Image: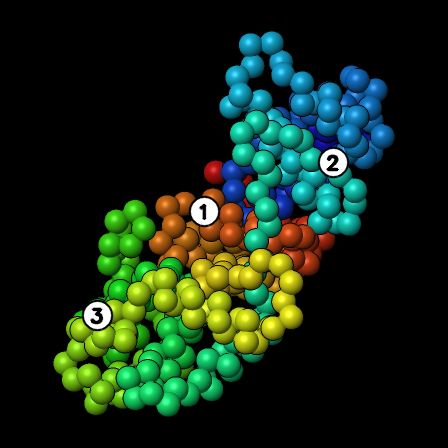
Amino acid sequence: MSDFKSKLTPYIEGLIEEQHAMGFSFNGQEQILKRFDKFIIDNELDTGQLESEVVSLWEERLPIEQDRSRNRRLQTVNKLAEYMQALGLHATFCHTMGKELQAILYTPSEDEIAKILTHVDNLDYEQPSLKRLCPAYSVMIRLYYFCGLRLSEVVMLNREDVDLSTGRLYIKKSKGDKDRYVYVAEDLRALLVKYDGYMEQQVPSREWFFPGFYSDKHFCRTSIDRKFREWWKACFPSWIGKRPTIHSLRHAFVINRINEWAKEGLDFKVMVPVLSKYLGHRSIEETYYYYNMRNPREESIRNIMERGSIAGEVELD
C-alpha cells in the first residue's frame, strides 16, 4: 500500500523510483515528500497539479525554521516539478533562498559533436609552426569527448603519463589534488600511437604529450577553450544562445554513457560508481549532477520507470 494519498502520488512515486534506479539514497527527500503529500490534502489543494497556489503556501517559512531547512524542502518539491515537466506536464517551481534555479546549460548532441570532429580533422594551417598543431587538436578533442576528461587534464599530460601499449593515461594532481588512471578505447589508443610517432619527428624527446605553440610548453587551457568556440562558430554560424564550451564535451560524455546503460538495461548501482571514479568525482551525486543539467530528462531514463527498476528491487543506501 502506498505511503502517499494525494493525486500527485503517481508522480511522487515515479520520482522516488527514478532516484533509486539511478543508485541514490533519496530517504531524506522521501520524508519531505510525505510531508508535502499530507500538506496538500490538509489544505484542500489536492487537484493533481503542482500549481502556484500550492507552491506559494508551501514556500511559507515555518516557525523557527532556518534557511537551510526551508531550502531543502523547497528544493525537494522543485525536483518533483522538474520530473513532472519532463513528462510534459505543467508544474510550478518554488522560489528558494540564495541562488536562483540554475540555468540549464546546453550540451552538444552526438550529431553536433560529429560535425565538430569532422571540422577539426580537416584543419590545415599553412604556417609550419601551426601545422603540427592540427593533429594535436584532433586527438585532444577526442580525449575530451570519448573519455570525459577535464580541460587541464589533457593539456597537462606528460609524455611519460601516456602508456601507449595499454592505452592507460595517468592523470596527476587533478581537481581535489587527486591522481587516477584512465583507460582509452583501442581505436583511440591507436590514434595516440600514430600521433606520438608523428610528434617524435616534429619535437624529438618532448616533455609534454601535447606541446603547444612553443614546443617546450603545453597548450594553454584558455587557448583550447577559445579554439573550441571558434570551431563551434565555424560549424554553426547562425547559432543563437549561449554556446557550449570544451567542458561541455565532458557533460556530453556522461549523458551519452548513462543513456547507453539505460537502453542496455544495466545496473546503475554498479555502473555509476565506476563512472564517478573514472571521471575523478568525489561522489556519484557529482556525476548525476551532470545528467540533471539536461532538461528534460532523456527518454531512455523515463523508460526505466515503465519497465521497473534496472536492478530489480533496489535497496536504499
Above or below for 187 versus 279: below
> What's the coloring here?
rainbow
- Separation of disc 3 and disc 1 at Cα? 32 Å
Q: Nearer the viewer, residue 229 or 13?
A: 229
Q: Is residue 297 left or right of residue 154?
A: right
The answer to which of marks 2 and 1 sits earlier in the sequence is: 2
* Mark 2 closeness class: few <14, some 14–19, many ≥20 residues within 10 Å: many
* Mark 3 closeness class: few <14, some 14–19, many ≥20 residues within 10 Å: some
Could you say where residue 143 lies in the image, as x and y percent from the top left? Answer: 39, 70
Instruction: Name the residue tied to disc 1.
Output: 286
Could you say where residue 230 lies in the image, as x and y percent from the top left? Answer: 48, 71
| Residue at image point 23% right, 75% down | 214
Asked if residue 261 shows in the view, the reply is: no
Label 3 or label 2, whichever lies nearer to me, is: 3
Instruction: Name the residue tied to disc 3.
Output: 217
| Residue at image point 79% right, 32% down | 51
Could you say where residue 164 lies in the image, as x and y percent from the top left? Answer: 26, 78
Disc number at residue 190?
none
Q: Which amino acid does label 1 sit on?
A: Glu
Q: Is residue 120 left or right of residue 132?
A: right
Could you say where residue 147 lies in the image, as x and y percent from the top left? Answer: 41, 67
Q: Which amino acid does label 3 sit on?
A: Lys
Instruction: Name the residue tied to disc 2.
Output: 92
Q: What residue type is labelled 2?
A: Thr
- Separation of disc 2 and disc 1 at Cα? 26 Å
